[in-house]
Amino acid sequence: MPATPAWPPRSAPRLFVATPLAKGEAVTVEGNQAHYLAKVMRMAEGDVAILCDDATGEWAARAVSVGKREIVLEPAEMLRPREQVPDFWLCAALLKKDRFDLVLEKASELGVRRIRPVLARRCVADKLNLDRARAIVTEAAEQCARTALPEVAEPVKLDALLRDWPADRTLFFADELGGEPAATAFAANPGPSALLIGPEGGFDDAERAAVRALPGARPISLGPRILRGETAAIAAAALWMATAGDW
């Protein structure tokens, strides 16, 4: 007797959509997403896609209409509710485009709740295409089957970040001059947290002093080796998730 095919199919494409999802309420997909489904995935009427709305969760949806420029999908079954995301922010200084793209992608995969790009004096880059950045984290979340998206905020100057820092959130400061071992600090300071990572040339003395003067700042060490900005951001975020997050 033949095995019953898995439903939804493992090969079903995954997409985040802006429309809130509910059973039986059709949503229309247009633009690049419609092109991907119709031309790349060869979707036909009756085929299934996995949709997420970053609010309710993950849904299996059937294509009820496939056109050249738009596809109409009807959610049929909720598969998973939206995941609970640890309250962890990544405040990473802007890097060269390809390196910061990697930070965005991996932060999304790791489960970071909020990404706050920071402008420091030694930053090589000083601008961020926010739409492109959000597209990168969305694609990463789709590829690793997440049901929630990290928030990507506008870049902020370091002094403004520190001035408006919430008193109830610990700021772990990856200081190349040293600090408490990161794993120890993470385990000893549960609760809302954030990680501050510097630019290619590091923070200058005045910036380092300003961060250390913040009451909620905890200088940490990421080990005996000097890490590039993208390596430090990814490694430290992974360590926080393993020590104080949801791993």
Image (cartoon, grey):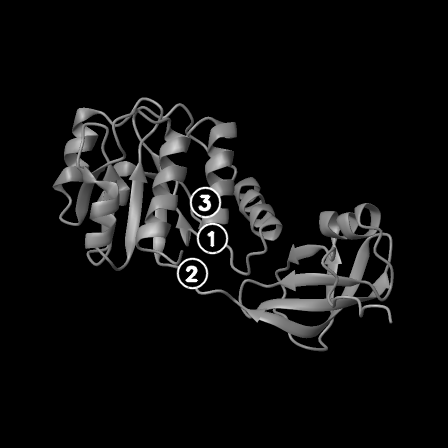
Residue count near mark 2 (Cα–Cα under 10 Å), binned few <14, some 14–19, many ≥20: some
Quarter of the image for residue 51 reads bottom right
Mark 1 and mark 3 in contact (Cβ < 8 Å)?
A: yes
Amino acid type, mark 3: Ala
Mark 2 and mark 1 in contact (Cβ < 8 Å)?
A: yes
- Describe the element under mark 3 as helix, strand or loop: helix
Q: In the picture provided, is 138 more to the left or to the right than 76?
A: left
On residue 107, the disc is 3
Q: In the picture provided, is 247 more to the left or to the right than 19?
A: left
Q: Is residue 183 above or below residue 188?
A: above
Q: Nearer the viewer, mark 1 or mark 2?
A: 2
On residue 128, the disc is none
Measured in 3D between alpha carbons, the distance from the residue under mark 3 to the one under mark 1, in whole angstroms, is 8 Å
Quarter of the image for residue 21 reads bottom right
Which residue carries the number 2 mark?
Answer: 85
Q: Could you say where residue 49 lies in the image, as x and y percent from the top left? A: 73, 61
Measured in 3D between alpha carbons, the distance from the residue under mark 1 to the one under mark 2, in whole angstroms, is 9 Å
Q: Is residue 227 above or below residue 106?
A: above
Amino acid type, mark 2: Val
For the N terminus, the image quarter is: bottom right
Which residue carries the number 1 mark?
Answer: 150
Q: Is residue 195 above or below residue 146?
A: above
